[in-house]
Image (tube, rainbow, N blue to C red):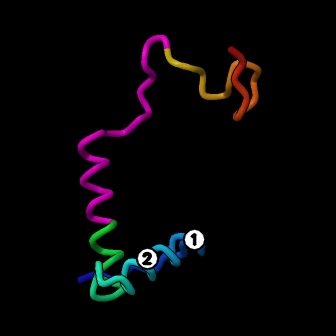
């Protein structure tokens, strides 16, 4: 099986460690593999979200800022 090295945020590492401690997974490797597989399946089910929906909001907000919408 190919090996992959990745860096994840501390909060995700803590969540994975907690799941292993609770016995939801045997070890970190199993947890990461299962969670990644589940995420890929969910992505395939929902598909990429790049297509714009008619009547949707603009990506850069109503006022030209990423996090600002005015209603």
Q: Is residue 60 above or below residue 6?
A: above
Give the residue displayed 60% in from the left and 28% down from the top: 59
Q: What residue range appears in magenta?
A: 36-55
Give the residue displayed 70% in from the left and 34% down from the top: 66
Q: Does 66 sit left or right of 47 as displayed?
A: right
Q: What secondary structure is marked by label 2?
A: helix
Q: Which residue is mark 2?
A: 16
**Which of the 4 image quarters holds residue 33?**
bottom left
Q: Is residue 26 above or below residue 6?
A: below
Viewer-side residue, 18 vs 39: 18
- Mark pair 2, 1: CA separation: 9 Å
Instruction: Looking at the image, tell me whether mark 2 or mark 1 is earlier in sequence order.
Output: 1
Q: Does 21 sit left or right of 63 as displayed?
A: left
Q: What secondary structure is marked by label 1?
A: helix
Give the residue displayed 26% in from the left and 46% down from the top: 44
Percent of width and height locating residue 37: 27, 64
Q: Is residue 3 magenta?
A: no
Percent of width and height locating residue 7: 54, 75
Picture quarter with the C terminus: top right
The dot on residue 11 is 1
Give the residue displayed 29% in from the left and 39% down from the top: 46
Percent of width and height locating residue 36: 33, 66
Viewer-side residue, 46 vs 27: 27
Picture quarter with the N terminus: bottom left
Q: Does 66 sit left or right of 21 as displayed?
A: right
Label pair 2/1, CB-CB below 8 angstroms:
no
Q: Is residue 46 above or below residue 19?
A: above
């Amino acid at each position: 099986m190919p090996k992959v090295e990745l860096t994840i945020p501390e909060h995700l590492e803590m969540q994975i460690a907690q799941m292993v401690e609770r016995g939801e997974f045997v070890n970190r490797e199993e947890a990461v593999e299962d969670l990644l597989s589940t995420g890929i399946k969910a992505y395939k089910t929902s598909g990429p979200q790049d297509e714009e929906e008619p009547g949707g909001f603009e990506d850069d907000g109503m006022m030209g800022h990423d996090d600002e919408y005015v209603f």
